[in-house]
Image (cartoon, helix red, strand yellow):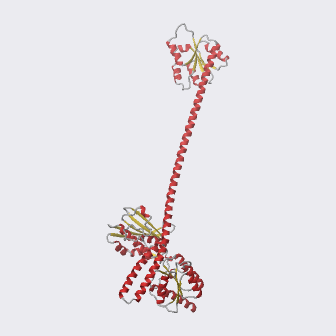
């Protein structure tokens, strides 16, 4: 279709003659009887058209002009015009028609057949090149569309990948933030544990000093005839008692304080403290108690809980110098693996800046002026909670107030244990009753030995665990009184060895700082004397252990 030549020569046999010449030259051709058929065939594809000038002389067809005007950019349809020899100039109308055809080859008749065939072949070649151009343009357009589609797909993939990377980056930043928080928590815990070990060691040494002072003051008070000297000794012992309470706070933070846990109703403990709290915080502070319905049972040391709540209440009072509201709340919370009792102390004070929140549980850290606080209140709260198997937490917002929360495992009634208390009064001993005292601190050992001799016991002494074990191998005393923290062999190790040598022998452990978990494995809480202790407490403990041994022996003999 693209290589054929259309012929439009309506007069006489011109069309057949032209077709015959082209056919002999191997050029495909088609005769169109009128302009309408010529346009139709041109629309169906053709290489060129041969028309006679007479057609143009009749007036240029408007439809043909519109077709030519609407050709695409690559198309310039070629015409071969068979002109009639003119004796003069062509009319203006004929010239205009020729110009509207555009791409024409004008041949005057009569025309040599070779000339006509050559003109037709030239027109076909020209049109063929136009069709090649069309094909290239179509290929370019198709490539452009493919490239645009690929670009669109690439942009979509880039956007999707960018979204994935953004999401991954968000997750990474979140994980980094979580890791930083976890690391900060670990560092804080390690710092508090390290401080706890340090304070525990300090408390041990300090309790030994207090114990020596207390014992000697008691000797002075007993032996002094001057009444004023007794008053001075009493005042000094009161100072020793205050120092002992300070050491107890240090041990509570270090989680080495010897607690006396038992089943308590936290609601009842807090309710009974209301009057004490109101007196402690003053009339400008309104105290509100919000207690959980029913009971809130937990196994803990009631005295330590009361001290913790009182410490938190006093801190809240100091944060509200112009008055405010102190709210104490108890709740049964079930947001973890096991239900807990939560005690919250909230105030409407100035709040704590975020930069200080991580430091408030540190011992000796305080925002109060010098001389207004020891900085041990919240550290004691922290240690008591951890030692009781619970947790502590603080939340604060500057200008809105602070809330300190303690959590303890919710106890069941069957979990209660009857924890025996040491007798309150001492009983004089007998010289036939022998006590072995093992203590590495010479002054502490001398004080205990003199107290026991004053009470009437026969006393032997050893300077450390190894010497104590050697003495036990030679002789079985009626009671062994041993210090816990000693070089080489500590008290727990000596007790274990003593039990193998002399099963059933009464044993008392006197300590200013003890790993209570280790102590409980070998002796139990009832047989522990916390330094500093006085003469009466020592006598009562020794008498109680010896009475228990006597009762056990009597029962064995009766059996």
Residue at 55% from the left image edge and 90% from the top image edge: 553
Taking 424 as reference, is 13 left or right? right
Measured from the top left, where is residue 326 in percent x and y? 37, 68
Above or below residue 547? Residue 346 is above
> For residue 394, which quarter of the picture?
bottom left
> For residue 56, which quarter of the picture?
top right
Residue at 55% from the left image edge and 42% from the top image edge: 154
- Of the 4 image quadrants, the one containing the C terminus is bottom right
Taking 121 as reference, is 232 left or right? left
Above or below residue 387? Residue 111 is above
> For residue 103, which quarter of the picture?
top right
Frontmost residue, 34 versus 293: 293
Above or below residue 493? Residue 157 is above
Measured from the top left, where is residue 364 in percent x and y? 42, 69
Residue at 52% from the left image edge and 11% from the top image edge: 90
- Of the 4 image quadrants, the one containing the N terminus is top right
Above or below residue 205? Residue 29 is above
Residue at 56% from the left image edge and 35% from the top image edge: 144
Q: Residue furthest front?
A: 442
Frontmost residue, 220 versus 503: 220
Measured from the top left, where is residue 17 in percent x and y? 63, 13
Measured from the top left, where is residue 414 in percent x and y? 51, 77
Q: Is residue 290 visible?
A: no
């Amino acid at each position: 279709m693209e290589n054929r030549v259309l012929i439009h020569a309506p007069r006489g046999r011109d069309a057949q003659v032209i077709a015959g010449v082209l056919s002999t030259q191997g050029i495909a051709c088609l005769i169109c009887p009128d302009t309408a058929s010529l346009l139709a065939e041109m629309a169906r594809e053709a290489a060129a058209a041969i028309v006679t000038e007479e057609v143009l002389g009749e007036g240029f067809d408007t439809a043909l002009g519109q077709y030519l005007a609407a050709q695409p950019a690559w198309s310039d349809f070629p015409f071969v015009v068979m002109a009639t020899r003119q004796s003069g100039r062509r009319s203006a109308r004929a010239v205009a028609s020729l110009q509207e055809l555009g791409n024409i080859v004008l041949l005057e008749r009569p025309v040599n057949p070779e000339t006509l065939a050559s003109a037709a072949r030239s027109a076909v070649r020209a049109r063929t090149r136009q069709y090649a151009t069309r094909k290239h343009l179509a290929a370019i357009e198709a490539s452009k569309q493919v490239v645009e589609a690929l670009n669109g797909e690439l942009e979509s993939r880039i956007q999707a990948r960018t979204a994935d990377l953004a999401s991954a980056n968000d997750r990474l930043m979140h994980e980094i933030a979580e890791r930083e928080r976890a690391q900060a928590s670990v560092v804080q815990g390690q710092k508090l544990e390290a401080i706890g070990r340090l304070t525990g060691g300090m408390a041990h040494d300090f309790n030994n000093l207090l114990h020596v002072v207390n014992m000697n003051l008691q000797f002075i008070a007993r032996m002094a005839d001057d009444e004023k000297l007794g008053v001075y000794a009493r005042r000094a012992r009161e100072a020793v008692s205050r120092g002992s309470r300070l050491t107890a706070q240090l041990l509570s933070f270090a989680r080495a304080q010897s607690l006396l846990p038992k089943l308590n109703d936290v609601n009842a403990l807090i309710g009974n403290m209301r009057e004490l709290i109101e007196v402690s915080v003053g009339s400008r502070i309104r105290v509100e108690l919000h207690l959980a319905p029913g009971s809130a049972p937990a196994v803990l040391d009631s005295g330590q809980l009361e001290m913790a709540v009182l410490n938190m209440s006093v801190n809240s009072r100091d944060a509200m110098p112009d008055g405010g509201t102190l709210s104490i709340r108890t709740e049964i919370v079930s947001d973890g693996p096991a239900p807990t009792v939560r005690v919250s102390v909230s105030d409407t004070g100035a709040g704590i800046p975020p930069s200080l929140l991580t430091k408030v549980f540190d011992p000796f850290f305080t925002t109060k002026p010098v001389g207004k606080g020891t900085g041990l209140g919240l550290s004691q709260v922290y240690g008591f909670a951890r030692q009781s198997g619970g947790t502590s937490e603080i939340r604060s917002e500057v200008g809105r107030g602070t809330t300190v929360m303690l959590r303890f495992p919710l106890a069941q009634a069957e979990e209660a244990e009857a924890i025996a208390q040491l007798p309150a009064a001492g009983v004089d001993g007998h010289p036939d009753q022998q006590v072995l005292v093992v203590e590495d601190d010479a002054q502490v050992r001398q004080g205990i030995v003199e107290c026991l001799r004053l009470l009437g016991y026969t006393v032997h002494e050893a300077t450390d665990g190894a010497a104590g074990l050697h003495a036990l191998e030679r002789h079985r005393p009626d009671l062994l009184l041993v210090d816990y923290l000693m070089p080489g062999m500590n008290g727990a190790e000596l007790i274990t060895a003593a039990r193998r040598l002399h099963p059933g022998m009464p044993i008392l452990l006197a300590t200013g700082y003890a790993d209570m978990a280790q102590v409980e494995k070998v002796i139990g809480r009832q047989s522990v004397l916390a330094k500093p202790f006085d003469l009466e407490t020592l006598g009562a403990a020794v008498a109680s252990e010896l009475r228990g041994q006597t009762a056990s022996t009597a029962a064995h003999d009766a059996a």
